[in-house]
Amino acid sequence: MTDQTLVQVVLPGIVEPEDLQVRRAARPQPGAGRITIAMEATGVSFAEQQMRRGRYYDQPPFPFVPGYDVVGRVYAVGAGVDPALLGRRVAVLTKVGGWASHVPADARDAVEVPEGLTAEQAETVVVNGITAWQMLHRKARVSAGQTVLVHGASGGVGQVLTQLALAAGVTVIGTASVRNHDALRAAGVLPVDRTANVPEQVRELAPDGVDAIFDHVGLSSVVECWPLLRRGGTLISYGTAATRDDTGSKQLPVLKILARTTLWTLLPNGRSASFFNIWAGKKLNQDRFRARLRADLTEVFGALRRGDITTSIAARLPLAQAGEALRLAESGTVSGKIVLTP
């Protein structure tokens, strides 16, 4: 591979992980206002698992390069971009395009990674950290002394979410497989068996209800847990994990949740519900969206440096083995972030 070669992993269609394609091409120069990032770490998230099946609700048409986020050094800058950015380690939320040796981005989307964090450490909290922080502090606006229910407390977003909540003085009830309960207890979480009657277990732990619920499972879970909210509480849905292997419309599961949560919020019941979309508001006000994302990711990086949150890396694989990494992520046999490196 020459110094000017771009390497990308391409998702050609609805294929098995082993059928991802590696593409090599000449590396383009960044245009005005843009930068090129030499990737040091990118991750495998649930989004890519859905995209492989054509199930992510607003994914681009095939073929495309997956990769929801990327961390790396600024390799080149276009016209109008401060050349002082060259060589600096930055993180960018991309949605797609991160699975590449060099990733183009708008310079305004780059958030500098603070000293003391490695690229891999930073990668573990980009999409997961922003999602957790915004749901917890911008949507639910939790405060010390409250109690929340986190579905998938051992998952990517769930781990960060529970730790941020605990750092804020919040009591956390978390659903997970029984094999993960000891680790949750050690972290200060009240574990609930996700395979048993979840509402019954939660009521035993919080007889008066919970102040917030964070659900990534889908509509059936949202409906089941809505009655667990106390007055003034809020339910935030942020995924449809239960539909990952379904067929048919990829938008319908999200639309059903949007309709249900909107109806509940309009009713005079003293509770609210919503569907969280990390990209909400970007088209309406890009400057505000960027400022909010920069502020929130900076907060998450700070929490990581202080030790308020810790993350684990389940596996590190080279970019060319992205298919193997995706298969491992889909197996459900590992806990922690799967990271791709150059």
Image: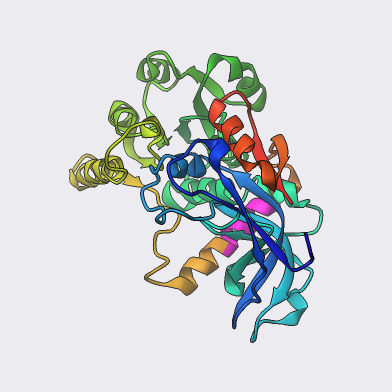
Which residue occupies the extreme right position in the image? Answer: 116
- Magenta span: predominant SS is helix
Closer to the camera, 290 or 29?
A: 29
- Range of magenta residues: 294-301
Residue 123: image x %, image y %? 67, 49
Q: Quadrant of residue 286?
A: bottom left
Residue 143 is situated, as x and y percent measured from the top left of the image, at 50, 44
- Residue 280 appears at what percent x and percent y? 40, 59
Judge whether residue 275 can be spotted in this image: yes
Which residue is pictured at 18% across the width and 43% down the height? 268
Q: Is residue 114 left or right of residue 240?
A: right
Quick check: is 55 in the magenta stretch? no
Q: In percent of the image, x 23 and y 47: which residue is there?
A: 262
* Nearest to the observer: residue 317 or residue 120: 317
Render colour scheme: rainbow
- Residue drawn 51% across and 48% down? 11
- Give the total number of marks visible in the rendering: 0
Q: Judge by depth and name the residue closer to the eye, 18 or 309.
A: 18
The answer to whether residue 90 is visible is no
The quadrant of the picture occupied by the N terminus is: bottom right
Queried whether the magenta region covers residue 297, the answer comes back as yes
At 65% from the left edge and 86% from the top edge, which residue is drawn?
Answer: 79
